[in-house]
Image (cartoon, rainbow, N blue to C red):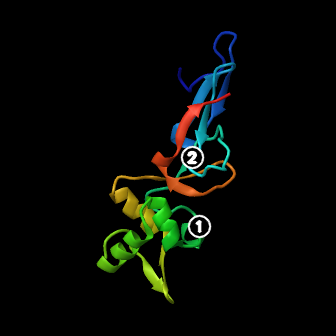
């Protein structure tokens, strides 16, 4: 089925998703739902929104930086691994503020892109950022 055009025959199409994951389904066909990695966040018909690899989206630096805990959760690694990487100068680049390390979102996005990963934002209730592969497509109602 192509995205171009309108209704075909007696069937109608409806749009699901955002960006590269736009999908059109015939009315009455099963929709795709996207499950968020956060267990209490309900599935949604709207696909996760990819974070630009450049980190240069409007207002990207106005967002608060990631904390060490957030980077560890995002990368699914133990907190001690993040501390080790920071000490060794490997992993996503971070900076010290008082006694805590912080990570510019654009630096984390860029580092993940260099590692072959893409970040995406949940379009359901939580609105949190995860690696793209953490989201799962599943059959809808």
Residue lying at the far top in this picture: please name it: 9
Is residue 78 positioned above or below 128 on the image? below
Q: Position of residue 7 (x, y in %)?
A: 66, 18
Give the number of marks.
2
Q: Nearer the viewer, residue 36 or 2?
A: 36
Q: Position of residue 92 (x, y in %)?
A: 38, 69
The quarter of the displayed image where residue 91 is located: bottom left
Q: Position of residue 33 (x, y in %)?
A: 61, 35
| Rendered image: mark on residue 72 | none
The answer to the question of whether label 1 and label 2 lie on touching residues, with beta carbons closer than 8 A, is: no
Is residue 100 positioned above or below 5 on the image? below
Q: Position of residue 56 (x, y in %)?
A: 49, 64
Say which label, 1 or 2, has the lower sequence index: 2
- Who's the residue at 44% across and 60% down the image? 75
Query: SS for tag 2?
Result: loop
Name the residue tied to disc 1: 59
- Who's the residue at 54% across and 73% down the image? 65
Query: SS for tag 1?
Result: loop
- In this rendering, position of residue 114 left or right of residue 60: left
Q: Nearer the viewer, residue 105 or 57?
A: 105
Name the residue tied to disc 2: 48
Is residue 11 positioned above or below 86 on the image? above
- Who's the residue at 52% across and 40% down the image? 136
What crowding class fits label 2: few (fewer than 14 Cα within 10 Å), some (14-19), or many (20 or more)?
A: many
The quarter of the displayed image where residue 58 is located: bottom right
């Amino acid at each position: 089925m192509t995205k171009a055009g309108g209704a075909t025959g007696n069937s109608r199409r409806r749009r699901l998703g955002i960006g590269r994951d736009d999908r059109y389904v015939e009315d009455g066909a099963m929709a795709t739902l996207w499950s968020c990695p956060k267990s209490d966040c309900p599935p949604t018909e709207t696909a996760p929104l990819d974070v630009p690899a450049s980190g240069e989206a409007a207002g990207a630096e106005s967002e608060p930086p990631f904390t060490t805990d957030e980077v560890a959760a995002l990368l699914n690694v133990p907190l001690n691994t993040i501390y080790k990487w920071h000490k060794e100068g490997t992993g996503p680049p971070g900076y010290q503020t008082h006694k805590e390390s912080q990570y510019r979102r654009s630096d984390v996005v860029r580092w993940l892109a260099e590692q072959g990963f893409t970040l995406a934002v949940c379009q359901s209730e939580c609105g949190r950022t995860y690696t793209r592969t953490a989201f799962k497509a599943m059959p809808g109602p």
